Image (spheres, rainbow, N blue to C red):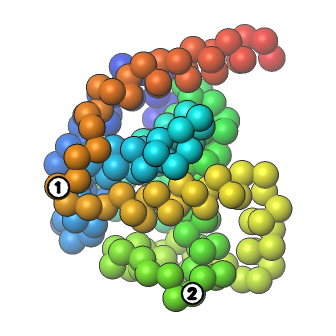
Amino acid sequence: MELRSVDELMELLYACRGVWDTPDRSGDPVDLHDHALQTAALLRRSRPADKELQIAGLVHDIGHALRPGDDAGHADHAADAVRALLGERVARLVRLHVAAKRYLAAVSPDRALSPQSALTMARQGGAMSRAEAAAFERDPLADDAVTLRQADDAGKVVGLDAGVLEDWRTVLELAAARNARLGAVD
């Protein structure tokens, strides 16, 4: 599925209320809607000037709603869905958030993951090998992907007030308009 408008994206994000990362709700303690808001808010706080990174935090897990139960492919599904609307950088960050988890597991093996993230790690390829980690580090978006992953891991707090989804509409509209202008120039 390719999202064609901010309205479609907002509709999908609103539809994430009451939808969890696992169909049987055995996963993370917050639904995808709250998780998206928390992740984006954490990124807004830590990187206030980087709107694309914040947006990537907002949309990084929509693949769980697009294809329930596909833990291994959820990042790819989300990236493919937002690329045309929000641009290549947002899509690449979304795609890289799983690789960043695998990277962090390799370089910081004692780093705690949520029980669900630990469970899905094997389906996503496990901790990176030394060669995979070195290749990941060479990616120009590696540091941003790690920042996104850290916010992803932290954005799972029951009851945390991270604002409302409508607060993100203008940011999404500006990003979509910018991406459309850049696409017209190419």
Residue 23 appears at what percent x and percent y?
23, 61
Q: Which residue occupies 29% across, 26% down?
A: 166
Q: Amino acid at mark 1?
A: Gly
| Disc 2 residue crowd, few under 14, some 14–19, many 20+, Cα 10 Å | few
Q: In this rendering, does residue 63 appear at all?
A: no
* Quarter of the figure with residue 71: bottom left
Query: Mark 1 against mark 2, which lies toward the viewer?
Result: 1
Q: Which residue occupies 63% across, 21% down?
A: 179
The alpha-carbon separation of the residues under discs 1 and 2 comes to 29 Å
The residue at which mark 1 appears reads as 159
Q: Amino acid at mark 2?
A: Pro
Q: In terms of secondary structure, where does tag 1 sit?
A: loop
Relative to 50, is 103 above or below?
Answer: below
- Circles 1 and 2, Cβ within 8 Å, touching? The answer is no
- Give the number of marks: 2
| Disc 1 residue crowd, few under 14, some 14–19, many 20+, Cα 10 Å | few
Residue 163 appears at what percent x and percent y?
27, 37
Residue 102 appears at what percent x and percent y?
59, 73
Sequence-earlier tag: 1 or 2: 2
Closer to the camera in the image, 122 or 86: 86
Quadrant location of the C terminus? top right
Relative to 77, is 48 above or below?
Answer: above
Q: In this rendering, does residue 45 appear at all?
A: yes
Closer to the camera in the image, 105 or 43: 43
Closer to the camera in the image, 76 or 166: 166
Q: Which residue occupies 53% across, 18% down?
A: 174
* Quarter of the figure with residue 26: bottom left
The residue at which mark 2 appears reads as 109
